[in-house]
Amino acid sequence: MKYEGVLTKMRTELTSTVEYYLIFESDFINVNQLLNKRISFNFLRFQCLHCGLQKKIFAQGYCYTCFSTLPQAGEWIRSPERSTAHLDIEDRDLEFEKEAQLQPHIVYLANSSDVKVGVTRKTQIPTRWIDQGAHEAIEIVEVPNRYLAGITEVALKSHVSDKTNWRKMLTNEVKDLNLEEEREKLKQYIPAEAMEYYLENNKETEIHFPVLQFPKKVKTLNLFKQPFYEGVLKGIKGQYLIFEDGTAFNVRSHEGYVVELGVL
């Protein structure tokens, strides 16, 4: 059986074990059902997720032109502390930026490899945690805009990492921690402007991923360098497909790639 479409990050659903879905224009695939099956990826061409043109993808599924001009690719996405919509100052499109930035945001702790601090819109909980491959996570503050979340993250990342070690995450070199205790240790470093939004009583969320076999060593698949790959799917964690031979395929980093997916 073969499917064809442009890759976007896998949709997820938090159940007892995370359910994953690949959404193509005319196909809908439950990726969990592909576990223990031999599947193949054949890279056909690029397709920008915004303009739809067959142009090389630069970042986030966009060609360079779209990435350089779209408000949803502005620097405040990667650096929330640079958000300015609360000051009525435009970056690329003030109306878009107000809608995106002036809504509840969560600063959280997630444990994927080691504990890290991160920021996301409230509506993206727990999706953001799943995408990062976190087996446990907890909210620290819930603030009314992205700027407050950003300055809180900046203050806290002097005391805890803001990065995920994806190799450790994929090989399951992880340990369970009491995130409520970790949150309490960081409370003293929360900026005064955000302290009133501190969440005292939230409990940590546990997440279980559909992985039958973790690799001992990981090798990454880059479809631009290796346009065809075939292997037996053994797990899904974060936005990675994990194969029997230790190959890990990051679906999100291949957004905008048109592929033929074969299920053998």
Image: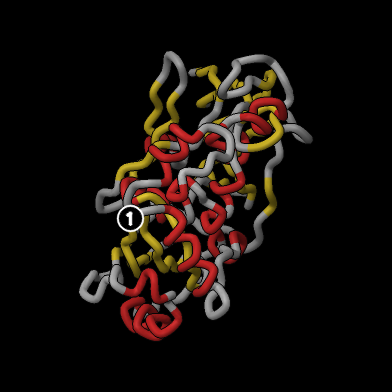
Image location (x, y in percent) of residue 141: 33, 67
Give left or right: position of 98 versus 161.
left
Q: Is mark 1 on a helix, strand or loop?
A: loop
Image location (x, y in percent) of residue 177: 39, 79
Q: In the image, what residue occupies the spot 64% across and 30% down? A: 69
The outermost residue toward the front is 88
Give left or right: position of 89 versus 219.
left
For label 1, the crowd category at 10 Å Cα-Cα, with few meaning under 14, some 14 to 19 and many 20 or more, is: some
Q: In this view, does 178 lie above or below 248?
A: below
Q: In the image, what residue occupies the spot 37% across and 46% down? A: 102
Q: In the image, what residue occupies the spot 54% across and 80% down? A: 159
Give left or right: position of 107 versus 83.
left
Write down the residue under mark 1.
144
Q: In this view, does 127 lie above or below 81?
A: above
Res 193 → quadrant: bottom left
Image location (x, y in percent) of residue 156: 50, 74
Q: Report if residue 132 is visible in the image.
A: yes
Q: Report if residue 235 is visible in the image.
A: no
The outermost residue toward the right is 225
Res 110 → quadrant: bottom left
- Name which residue type carries label 1: Pro
